[in-house]
Image (cartoon, grey):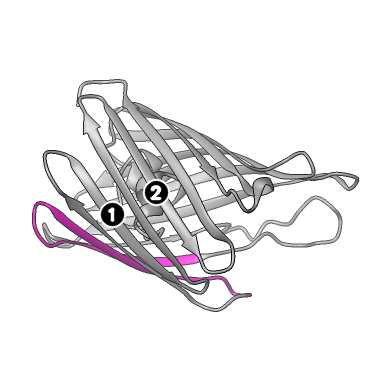
Amino acid sequence: MGARQMAMGGASASLSDAWALFHNVAGLAQQKQSFAFAYEASPQLPGANRMAASWQIPVRSFTTGIGFFRFGDALYNEQFISLGVAHRMGITSLGAKVNFSQYRADGFGVLSAMTLDIGGITQLTPELRVAAYITNVTQSSLNSGSGERLPMRMVVGVGFQFTKKIIATTEVEKDPDYPLTWRTGFEYDVYKNLFFRTGYQLQPNAFYFGIGGNRKRLRIDYALRYHFLLGASHQASATFLLSNP
């Protein structure tokens, strides 16, 4: 979630902003207090709309994040509540978050699970940062008695600041049960905090585009994803700083 991340092809492991809670939680480190909301609509798949909200709260040298995510409709839906914390030590930021996940299918009841994610980001040079995170480190299972485990994903990424106006990110993701996924994205500061973004993903293949802008304490972003079979999806997100920038 987060239209900035989506517009850059989802290559978000090395990004640090209010939406890091839903990606690499280490990116929360040193963030200001803020509230963020996002909604994604898929016209060709009306039952696959998504929404999320998060609240970032600095506490001394740590930043905590509380987030909510929902996917689906009345027939099938997924809901997550996440609580994360991140801290920066020198050139490295580390973070961890706990997720309570709930899955509901009409006629099949409700299943749930608790999972743990961890991540890190290291600023090797002023221009280069490397990042990695793992979801469901505990390999938790649903409480259905079947022993069915939730997915565990391992992501490694790199972010590079070519100039003050151009950022590039790239990453690979591996789920033990699926082929390797590769994502890459670019962000260009066109003019005074007006941004153009684009990205691409392999396995599954999709193109991404987006724009965004900052105005004092408010940041608004829009992203478009085009998949060859599923068509277009649209996401809009807004972040409001609750403390001075």
Q: Nearer the viewer, residue 8 or 14?
A: 8
Task: Tell me which residue sits at (53%, 69%) in the image.
Answer: 228
Residue 239 screen position, x and y as percent? 35, 31
Magenta segment main secondary structure: strand
Q: Quadrant of residue 221?
A: top left
Is disc 2 in contact with disc 1, using a CB cutoff of under 8 Å? yes
What is the secondary structure assignment of the residue under circle 1?
strand
Q: Nearer the viewer, residue 95 or 230?
A: 230
The amino acid pointed to by label 2 is Ala
Q: Within 10 Å of the Cα at label 1, are there few (<14), some (14-19), or many (20+) other Cα atoms?
A: many
31 lies above or below 207 = above
Q: Which residue is mark 2?
A: 223
Q: Which residues are magenta?
A: 154-177
Please identify the residue farthest to the left as the structure is shown: 163
Residue 41 inside the magenta-drawn segment: no
Q: Quadrant of the C terminus?
A: top left
Q: Within 10 Å of the Cα at label 2, are there few (<14), some (14-19), or many (20+) other Cα atoms?
A: many
Task: Tell me which residue sits at (84%, 52%) in the image.
Answer: 144
Please identify the residue farthest to the bottom as the structure is shown: 179
Residue 198 screen position, x and y as percent? 31, 59
85 lies above or below 125 = above
On residue 197, which mark appears? 1
Residue 177 screen position, x and y as percent? 63, 75
Residue 208 screen position, x and y as percent? 39, 59
